[in-house]
Image (cartoon, rainbow, N blue to C red):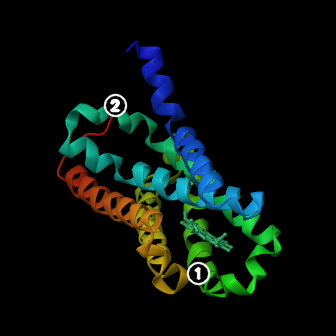
Amino acid sequence: MKPLNDELLWKGAPFLVFAAFLAFYALTQPSISSTRIFSKAFAASAVIVLSASIGMTGVAKVWPKHRKGLEHRKSWGVVGFVFAFSHAALAFSDPLLFLPELASSRQNVRIGLMALVIFAALAVTSTRFAEKALGKNWKRIQRAGYVALALVLADVLVLGDGTFVKTPIGLVLAFAALGGLVLGVRGWFERDRGFREL
Ligand code: HEM
């Protein structure tokens, strides 16, 4: 593959994930509103993209031929945050959140909100300028990403009183978040032992 195509594929990957989830929800749940379909597609792709962003350092350590992905880690984090924010905004803007059938989802809102605030801090501080300005504190802030991903994992596990994780999509999202968390933490330890990032 030509380098330019390769670059486009890495950059465009989050949007392909979103398009795949949008098609999936539209095809499998045709009776629900388009707002809910978009909200669910944004939520699911946010989990995948944020897990990939946080787990990338560990992936690069375990499979060094994928080191190139490190260059896209920050942009995936920002796009993942935008997806998560769009999901939350749609959920809030719709009577959706107040439907009796979604009563259990309301318990998740607090966990989701905490994760969202942390992801917002990571997105805002992902620039080189912020990295320089914050010095040592920058790493500390970035490490809060592991806490946010753990919250997302908890959110997926308790969604729908625990029934969501028994669905195929719930299982995929739970494994993605768990994988991202384990690989992210592994990458963190390797980095501290002198593993140099790109
Ligand atoms: C203020 C923040 C948030 C609010 C108000 C919120 C609200 C909701 C609501 C109402 C649902 C049920 C949707 C439905 O059944 O149609 C839902 C599901 C979901 N949320 Fe959130 N959420 C928030 C943050 C987050 C965050 C930060 C994530 C992860 C990055 C997330 C991931 C999910 C997932 C994976 C689902 C299940 C989607 C599905 O049914 O397939 N949420 N959320």
Where on the picture, by quarter, is residue 110?
bottom right
Task: Say which element carries label 2.
Answer: helix
Q: According to the image, label 2 marks what residue?
A: 68
Q: Are marks 1 and 2 in contact (CB under 8 Å)?
A: no
Q: According to the image, label 1 marks what residue?
A: 108
Q: Nearer the viewer, mark 1 or mark 2?
A: 1
Quarter of the rendering occupied by the N terminus = top left
Q: Depth check: 108 or 133 in front? A: 108
* Label 1 – label 2 distance at C-alpha: 35 Å
Quarter of the rendering occupied by the C terminus = top left
Mark 2 surroundings: few (<14), some (14-19) or many (≥20) residues within 10 A? some
Instruction: Note whether 59 is above or below 152 in the view shown.
Output: above
**Residue shown at 54% from the left, 58% from the top:** 44
Type of amino acid under label 2: Lys
**Residue shown at 47% from the left, 28% from the top:** 9
- Horizontal placement of 109 versus 5: left or right? right
Residue 165 shows in this picture? yes
- Which circle's residue, 1 or 2, is located before the other in the chain? 2
Q: Depth check: 109 or 96 in front? A: 96
Q: Is the CB atom of the residue marked by disc 1 within 8 angstroms of ligand 1's nearest atom?
A: yes
- Percent position of residue 169, x then y: 47, 63
Mark 1 surroundings: few (<14), some (14-19) or many (≥20) residues within 10 A? some
Residue 195 shows in this picture? no
- Horizontal placement of 38 versus 136: left or right? right
Image quarter for ligand 1 equals bottom right
Q: Residue furthest top?
A: 2
Task: Say which element carries label 1.
Answer: helix
**Residue shown at 40% from the left, 12% from the top:** 2
Where on the picture, by quarter, is residue 84?
bottom right
- Percent position of residue 182, x then y: 28, 62
- Percent position of residue 171, x then y: 39, 67
Type of amino acid under label 1: Asn
